[in-house]
Amino acid sequence: MGHETAPLDPADWEEFRALGKQIVDDMVDYLAGVRDRPVWQPVPDAVRARLATELPRTGTPMAAVYQDFCESILPYPRGNIHPRFWGWANGSGVPIAAYADLLASVMNCTLGSGENAAMLVERQVIDWLMQAFDWPDTGSGVLTSGCSMGQIIALAAAREARTGGWDVRRDGNLAGPQLTVYGSTETHHSVEKAVELLGIGRTFFRQIPVDEDFRIEVAALREAIREDRAAGFHPLCVVGNVGTVNTGAIDPLEELVALAREAGLWLHLDGAFGAFAYLLPSHRRLLACLNQADSLVFDLHKWLYLPFDVSCVLVNRPDALEAAFSSTADYISRTDRGPAAYEVAFSDRSIEQSRRFRALKVWFALRTHGIDAFADAIAGNIEQIARLTELADASEALEVVSRSRLNIATLRYVWPQGGAQALDQVNREILSQLQVGGLAMPSHTVIDGKFVIRVANNNHRTTTADIEFLVDRIQAIGDRLTRQLPAAPRGDSR
C-alpha cells in the first residue's frame, strides 16, 4: 500500500509556525548581543559527547531538537560574526542575508538549468558584480561555493582556451606537451590543489619569488616562461594575486596583463577578498587592470560580508566556461518550449549540476543596503588596519612585520633582550591567551622566519575601539609574560 500522506512535513503546521517565530526571535537576540559574548570558547567534553552519538532511528520532537541546538551548538561557533574576529579571511555575515538563506531553503530550487526565477536572480547578481568591477559586458560568470572551487573552474577554462593544438577535454593533458602554470610563492594553496586536480601536477606549478613587498618578481616570471618553452613545455596560465592571504600584497597587475598578452598566456587573478577594494576610489588606480584579466575569482563571504557560502568566477570571453564544462547528455538537453528551453545552463559553466540558490542572499543584501554601503564598510576596515599599524609603530613593545594597502597587517610583541626563540614563544602565548580567553581572534603566520600575529579585517562590526583594545591586550599580555621570563641572552628583537 502506497503512502497517502507527507510524513516528513510537520504533523501540526501551527506548532511548526510557533517554533519558527521563536527561532527568529532567538536569532535576532543572538545577533544583537554578539558583542557581549566571548569571541570563541572551547567545546566542553560533555558537549563533544552529545555531538558524537549514534545514528537516530526514531524521531525527537522538533522543539527538543532546537533546544539541543541552543545548548550544544549555538554557544560554540567559530566566532567570525563577533566584532573582534580578525582571523584567517572569514567574513562577518550580513543579517538580512540569513533571512534570504531561509527563503532559498524553503523554495529549494536547484540552479543547474531551466527557466525559473532563481535562475534569473543569479543572472542578475552576476551582471551586478560585473558592473561593480567594470567587467567587459561580453564576459560571463557563475556563483560557486568559494575560491577553491573557483580556481579549478578558471584554470579549466584556461586549459580549454590555451591548449590550442589538441582537444584536452577528449584526450586529456597527455595528448600534448606538459602544461605549466605560474604564480608567486605567496599564491594561495588552493591554486596548487587546482593544478593537482586538473592533472597538470604540483611540480609544474612554478612558484616565482617575490620582492620585499611580497609581490611577484615579473623578471623572474618572464625567465621561467622562457625556460619552460625552451624545454618543450606549454606555458598555460599566470595566476596573479589581488591581496595575498599572508600579507595582503597585490601583484603588479599592469605588468602581468602586458606579459600575459605578449606571451599568449591566460591571466587569472585570485581576488578572494582583495578584489573588493576596487569599489573604493582610493584603490581604483591600484587595481585598475583587474578587469583586463581573462578570469577573476572573489569570495562574497569574505569582504562583502555575506554568510557562507557564496563566491564568484568571472571570465572575459562569453563562451569560456561553457567551452570547458558544457555537456550534451540527453537528459539535460533543451526543448523548444517549457523550462528546458531556457537559454542559460549554469551547470555548463562549472563542475556542479546541483547548485543551491546562493544568489538570493546576494540579491537581498545588495537590494537592502546598496553597493555603496558595502564600499563604506570596506573603507572602514582599511582605516582600522591603518590605525592598528599607527598604534604599533608608536609602541616600543610592538613591531609591524608587514603592512598593506588593504585590510591585513602582521605584528609581534618585542623587547630588547628577546632572542628569536623567546620572541616566538611569547607571541605564540599572547595569541593563545587572546583566543582561548575569548578576548579577540587574530590568527598567525610566519614571515621571514618570525612567528607573527596576523590581523585580517573582513568585519563590518569592528570599530576603532576594538582595534585599540587588541593593541592594548597584546601589550599587556606581553608585558606580563616577559616579566615572568628569566633573563635571556641579548638578541636582536627586530
Image (cartoon, rainbow, N blue to C red):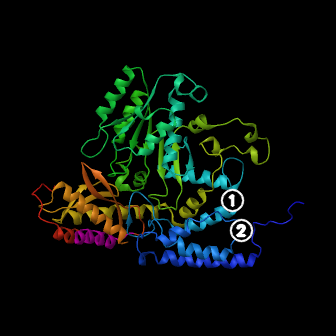
Residue that sits furthest to the right in the current view: 1
Give the numbered dot on residue 58: 2
Q: Callout 1 environment at 10 Å: few (<14), some (14 to 19), or many (20+)?
A: few
Is 336 left, or right, of 298 in this rendering? right
Residue 77 x, y percent position in the rendering: 48, 68
Depth check, mark 2 against mark 1: the one in front is 2
Is 157 situated above or below 79?
A: above
Task: Identify the residue position indicated by label 1 in the image.
Answer: 108
The residue depicted at 36 percent of the width and 41 percent of the height is 253
167 and 63: which is toward the camera: 63
Residues marked 2 and 1 touching at CB (< 8 Å): no
Type of amino acid under label 2: Thr
Is 81 left, or right, of 171 in this rendering? left
In the image, residue 427 lies in the stretch drawn in magenta: no
Residue 210 x, y percent position in the rendering: 29, 41
Residue 426 x, y percent position in the rendering: 23, 63
Is 148 left, or right, of 218 in this rendering? right
The residue depicted at 15 percent of the width and 63 percent of the height is 415
Type of amino acid under label 1: Asn
Please identify the quadrant where the C terminus is shown.
Answer: bottom left
Which residues lie in the magenta part? 462-477
Please identify the quadrant where the N terminus is shown.
Answer: bottom right
Give the numbered dot on residue 300: none
